[in-house]
Amino acid sequence: MQERHLFEYAVIRAVPRVEREEFLNVGVVLYCAGKRFLQVRYDTGLQRLAVLAGRQEVEEVACYLHSFAQICAGGKDGGTIGRLPVAERFRWLTATRSTVVQASKVHPGFCTDPAEKLNELYMQLVAPVSQAQ
């Protein structure tokens, strides 16, 4: 039997008009300490977001999501936050904030392969219905 590892994840939400509190799930960030794993998977097309917001907001959200990926990857491309230890980067990414890109509450679970679990969660929580089937 394969070893199971504790993981934590949060859904990334685009909130184009914070005052209206409408959001769209656009990604998932997953952290697994046992595997030293921190990655994000997000919707690069964002066509669904264009329905709620204008083109300018979609481009802004895409830029923020790219920053999420750079911070997850670590190193100098992730800026000051990208140089932090993996656990601290995850906590920073999932901290409560009132901006156009927000994270849900953090949820725990167990998995054998964090990359596979990230893809599974993305398909369940983010992918358009046409992709998820």
Image: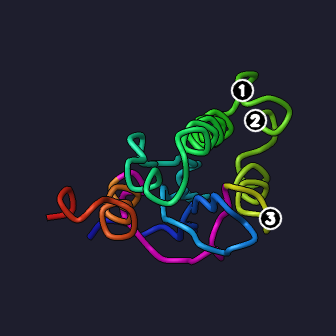
User: Residue 36: percent from the left, percent from the top?
Assistant: 59, 48
Q: In percent of the image, x 61 and y 58: which residue is there?
A: 33
Residue 5 lies, in percent from the top left, at 48, 67
Element marked by disc 1: loop
| Extreme residue in the top direction | 76
- Asked if 128 appears above or below 59 in the picture, the reply is below
Question: Which numbered dot is residue 98?
Answer: 3
Q: For residue 100, which quarter of the picture? A: bottom right
The quadrant of the image that shows the C terminus is: bottom left
Rounded to the nearest angstrom, the CA distance separating label 3 from label 2 is 21 Å
Q: Residues within 10 Å of mark 3 (few under 14, many from 20)?
A: few
Residue numbers of the magenta segment: 101-115
Q: Is residue 117 above or below residue 70?
A: below
x 38%, y 41%: residue: 45
The residue carrying mark 1 is: 75
2 and 1 marks in contact (CB < 8 Å) = yes
Tell me, for residue 67, which label it has, or none.
none
Q: Residue at x 54, y 47 (%)?
A: 54
The quadrant of the picture occupied by the N terminus is bottom left
Q: Is residue 104 magenta?
A: yes
* Label placed on residue 82: 2
SS assignment at label 2? helix
